[in-house]
Image (cartoon, rainbow, N blue to C red):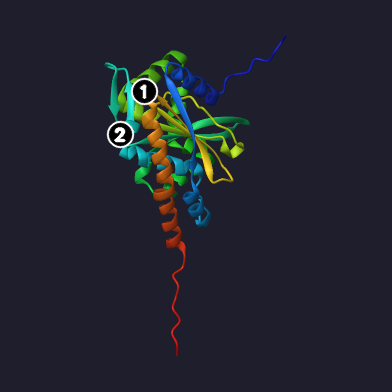
């Protein structure tokens, strides 16, 4: 049949490059519902509710602060090795509409465990709403995506296989979700080493989480422990920050003085 030839847009070219870079990563995944009753109660009472992406970005970074393996990259140059980062760098998948087409672009959040939840949320919301040229992470990756294919492959190879460069360009973990469009488990691909996706909150106060990881770095037993710890962090540290913010915004009671 006669079809229509359409040009590959810049964001779709980026996804094609990302999938090419993900081809040889030996990913394994573990899915588990997390009980988030304490978090839901705290979030319901918050004056300003942060988005779920911000919550999971900070929570995972807090767990990674305790578990160096979650800050570890597999690199090939100059020889295959593990490269441990001093802090986490999150790459958050941002769904946008550009020139009438849906696309996904990565927003970089460095050391989210050292930021307030409100600041993490503000960075993600800025990436969703601001023009592309006003988001440094978008400008950086799209500048490379405009290059001819041989140069793009070279830049991606350098960025993925030198530890210091990989953290700058691809981070130490990714967060993505389609929860805004309904229920479903997303098993996303990326160059790794860790990709976390989450579903919608359920009536039984649980939320489904999928964690995919580069099997060269660690095994399923540790990832199971990580998900257990993630559940604890969501219901303690993250819920506690939401409660403290609510207390700070509430007006202090004034005791009446009898006359």
Residue at x 44%, y 30% (from the top left corner): 195
Q: Which mark is residue 182?
A: none
**Looking at the image, do the residues carrying marks 1 and 2 touch, with CB atoms under 8 Å apart?**
no
Per the image, the residue denoted by label 2 is 68
Mark 1 or 2, closer to the camera? 2
Q: Is residue 71 above or below residue 47?
A: above
Q: Counting other residues with Cα less than 10 Å from the Cα at mark 2, is it few (<14), some (14-19), or many (20 or more)?
A: some
At x 41%, y 42%, the residue is 59
Mark 1 neighbour class, 10 Å CA radius: few under 14, some 14 to 19, many 20 or more: some
Question: Toward which corner of the image does residue 147 lie, by quadrant?
Answer: top left
Which of these two is toward me, 177 or 28?
A: 28
Which image quadrant: the N terminus?
Answer: top right
Mark 2: secondary structure: helix
Please state the horizontal and vertical placement of residue 239, each as a whole percent of the image: 44, 51
Tell me if residue 150 comes above or below residue 183 in the rendering: above
- Residue that numbered label 1 is attached to: 159
Q: Position of residue 33 (x, y in %)?
A: 50, 38
């Amino acid at each position: 049949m006669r079809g229509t030839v359409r040009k590959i847009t810049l964001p779709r070219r980026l996804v094609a490059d990302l999938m090419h870079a993900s081809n040889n990563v030996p990913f394994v995944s573990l899915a588990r519902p997390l009980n988030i009753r304490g978090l839901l109660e705290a979030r319901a009472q918050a004056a300003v509710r942060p988005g779920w992406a911000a919550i999971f970005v900070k929570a995972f970074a807090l767990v990674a602060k305790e578990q160096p393996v979650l800050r570890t990259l597999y690199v090939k140059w100059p020889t295959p090795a593990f490269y441990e980062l001093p802090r986490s760098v999150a790459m958050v998948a941002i769904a946008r509409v550009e020139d009438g087409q849906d696309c996904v672009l990565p927003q970089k959040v460095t050391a989210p465990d050292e930021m307030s939840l409100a600041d993490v949320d503000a960075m993600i919301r800025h990436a969703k709403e601001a023009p592309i040229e006003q988001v440094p992470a978008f400008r950086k990756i799209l500048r490379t995506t405009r290059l001819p294919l041989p140069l793009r492959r070279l830049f991606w190879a350098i960025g993925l296989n030198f530890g210091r460069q990989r953290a700058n360009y691809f981070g130490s973990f990714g967060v993505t979700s389609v929860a805004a469009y309904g229920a479903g488990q997303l098993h996303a691909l990326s160059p790794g080493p860790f990709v976390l996706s989450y579903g919608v909150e359920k009536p039984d106060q649980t939320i489904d989480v999928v964690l995919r990881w580069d099997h060269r770095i660690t095994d399923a037993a540790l990832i199971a422990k990580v998900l257990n710890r993630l559940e604890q962090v969501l219901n303690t540290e993250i819920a506690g920050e939401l409660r403290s913010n609510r207390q700070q915004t509430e007006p202090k009671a004034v005791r009446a003085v009898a006359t």
